[in-house]
Amino acid sequence: MKPINRASIRKAQAFLVKTIAGIIILSVVANLFTDLLKGTTSFLLNAILQILTLLFRSYVETIHSEIGEARSDGLLKTLYVVVFVFGFYALFRFPRGLILQSRRYEQERENYQEQVEVCKSEMKRLAESGGDVPVTEDGSKTTTELLKERIEHLLNVAELSNRSAVSYKRDAFELLTGIFLILLWVFGGLIGNAYTRSASTFVERSIEILAPTIPPEKVLQLRAEYRSVDSARKFYELHDVLQTIAKEKNVTLPKFTVIKR
């Protein structure tokens, strides 16, 4: 039976504690971030949405396409937050391990190169002092020849270390890029989902606020138009109608910032 490696156990426990602490901290940050997104008048939220709609022209259609469905996907938002937190954690955790491994190989390469320089210095000293003598039993190889073989070996392993370092760097870059793109996709979905739900809430509240001041038929018409919203154009038209009626009836509607191209 092998003895218990207490050092390994301590390392595993430390890693587990750091991981749990990191997840807890990121969860807190994500909750704060989600709370920030709840305010539709948030300057940060609107600025990000405006930038996304400028970069991706189809994005404005995406965030307006489901307003009429009036869905409340709390589970979907939670899933977005979980994926975002894990991706944010992975962004700093996993590529870092590859970069550290790359640095280890770079250090090995430097060590091998230093040994090569030592061997070359020794060869130079032997050449100047004339102390190059056979060192093998059969006398077939001299000290200089052995040093040359040593240098060749060191150069080979240094090249292998260099290739490994470059490979780990490339893997870290690819992983970092992949995680970053996933985070962008999740982030876009998260704030788009927040905007869509906020827009639905705005329309529902506005119709209920205006209901006592307009005929029942007009209320039904507004609700029908609301449920038929599946594009940015239809939402803009409905929003303008609600604002026009509110001005005519001198009614104050909830504050809401419409995202346009």
Image (cartoon, helix red, strand yellow):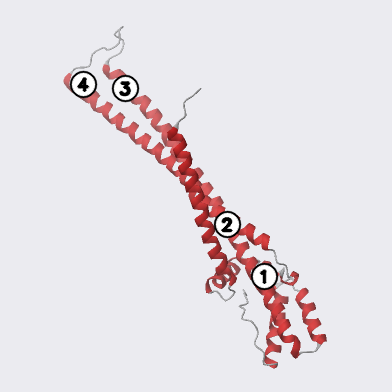
Residue 84 tag number? 2
Residue 148 tag number? 3
Residue 125 tag number? none
Closer-to-camera residue (39/64): 39
Quarter of the image where one finds residue 215: bottom right
Amino acid at the residue labelled 3:
Lys
The image quadrant where one finds the C terminus is: bottom right
Amino acid at the residue labelled 2:
Phe
Q: Earlier in the sequence, mark 4 or mark 2?
A: 2
Q: Earlier in the sequence, mark 1 or mark 4?
A: 4
**Residue at 44% in and 33% down:** 6
Q: Give the Cα separation between the discs numbered 4 and 2.
A: 63 Å
Q: Which residue is mark 1?
A: 197
Q: Position of residue 157 (x, y in %)?
A: 40, 29
Amino acid at the residue labelled 1:
Arg
Above/below status of 236 relative to 16: below
Quarter of the image where one finds residue 186: bottom right
Q: Position of residue 134 (x, y in %)?
A: 26, 12
C-beta proximity under 8 Å, tags 1 and 4: no
Count neighbours of disc 3 (C-alpha within 10 A) and say few if under 14, some if 14 to 19, many if 20 or more: some
Secondary structure state at the residue bearing disc 4? helix
Q: Earlier in the sequence, mark 3 or mark 4?
A: 4
Q: Which residue is mark 4?
A: 126
Task: Tell whether 55 sits left or right of 22.
Answer: right
Quarter of the image where one finds residue 236: bottom right
Residue furthest out toward the top: 138
Q: Earlier in the sequence, mark 1 or mark 3?
A: 3
Amino acid at the residue labelled 4:
Leu
C-beta proximity under 8 Å, tags 1 and 3: no
C-beta proximity under 8 Å, tags 3 and 2: no
Q: Position of residue 188 (x, y in %)?
A: 60, 63
